[in-house]
Image (cartoon, grey):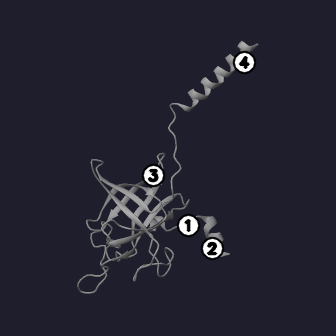
Amino acid sequence: MNFLVRMFLRSLVAALLMSSTGRAETIAPVDPGGTWLTEDGRARIRLERCGTARDRICGFIVWMKDPVDPRGQPFRDSFNPDPDKRTRALLGHQLILGLKVTPEGRFDGDIYNAEDGKSYSVSLWRDASDRLKLKGCLLKLLCQTQTWTQTLDVQAGQLVGLTGDPGGPRADREWASLPAQAKKAAAK
């Protein structure tokens, strides 16, 4: 009898060990939502949930150290490959484009660079409660990592409205739609 109990327990332990090995562990992502000061201090980026299922992360420029050119005109997205977007102001435009969560607990997708009009692969994750790591790559070979710092204050000229509202940033067309449940809740 003792022999059967030991065999059963050994089999149970072996089954548990085999079921836990060889599987990719999924790490719960830490939401990167909030406003972040870029490493060079030239801009603040607001990250928030976006897309129809609100399962993606989008980012918007909500403050710029120098939002206007020497003539006093707002800097424009003049290098954008989409001619319809070339006249939009850089302040308030979307630069992080629907990042998806990975099994490692990071968010991967694309970031748009208005300085050259190109999009690059990007991965971001919280390094600490008030620090965000952002790794951008060109062709997955040439990569650079930055550290952004969370900000809780509001600077003069910072957009503080909700995305799509007056005084807030503007989502690109493909990320502007809300899920049906959110529209119903907003109507109430």
Task: Give above or below for 120 relative to 82.
Answer: above
Question: x, y percentage for residue 176?
Answer: 49, 68
Q: Marks 2/1: CA distance? A: 10 Å
Mark closer to the observer (4, 2) = 4
* Mark 3, residue position: 106
Mark closer to the observer (1, 4) = 4
Residue that protrudes farthest toward the bottom in the picture: 72
* Mark 1, residue position: 178
- Image position of 115 (left or right of 101): left
Given the image, on which type of amino acid does mark 3 rest? Arg
Instruction: Please tell me how crowded label 1 is: few (under 14), some (14-19), or many (20+) other residues with Cα within 10 Å.
Output: some
Q: Marks 3/4: CA distance? A: 44 Å
Is 123 in front, or is 177? 123
Q: Marks 1/4: CA distance? A: 57 Å
Task: Give above or below for 118 relative to 169.
Answer: above
* SS category of the residue bearing label 3: loop
Is 137 in front, or is 112? 137
